Image: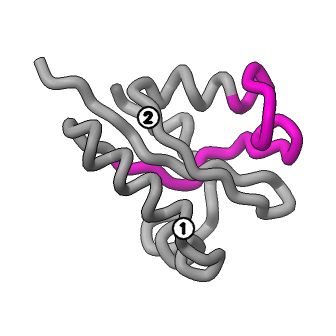
Amino acid sequence: MAKTYYSYMMASSSGVLYTGMTNDLRRRTFEHKNKLIEGFTEKYNCNKLVYFESCTDIKSILEREKQIKNWNRSKKERLINKDNPEWRDLSDQIIL
């Protein structure tokens, strides 16, 4: 069975964005929400999953994460707004 990898964006209530990748989106989202990971998301309270996409090829998802990280704020917002214009927390919709 192929492993699934995810590129995702977390947002804070003030709109700070964090882009990451993981092989377990449910666990990773839980870690962000509960401040179990020291660093950027803890400091800026990025605890709302506003975007994610999946892929079974780790190289492709790493490239995608890098691509999104290099985008300007406006382009990231367009990506989120395309599928999640209300910037709802999608963590309750994760079906794995």
Q: Is residue 30 magenta?
A: no
Describe the element under mark 2 as helix, strand or loop. loop
Residue 45, how many percent across, how many down? 84, 43
Q: Position of residue 74 (x, y in %)?
A: 61, 81
Indicate left or right for 19 with 16 as reference: left
For residue 96, above or below residue 21? above
Mark 2 or mark 1, which is nearer to you? 1
* Horizontal and vertical percent position of residue 70: 54, 67
Image spot of residue 40 (x, y percent): 78, 42
The boundaries of the magenta stretch are: 32-53
Residue at image point 27% right, 43% down: 59
Q: Is residue 72 left or right of residue 84?
A: right
Q: Quadrant of the C terminus?
A: top left
User: Where is mark 2, residue-wise?
Assistant: 94
Q: Identify the residue shown where x is 37% and y is 46%.
A: 62
Residue shown at 37%/31% (left/top)?
95
Mark 2 burial class by Cα count in 10 Å: few <14, some 14-19, many 20+: few
Report whether 48 appears left or right of 45: left
Q: Is residue 63 above or below residue 42?
A: below
Q: Which residue is mark 1?
A: 70
Q: Is residue 42 magenta?
A: yes
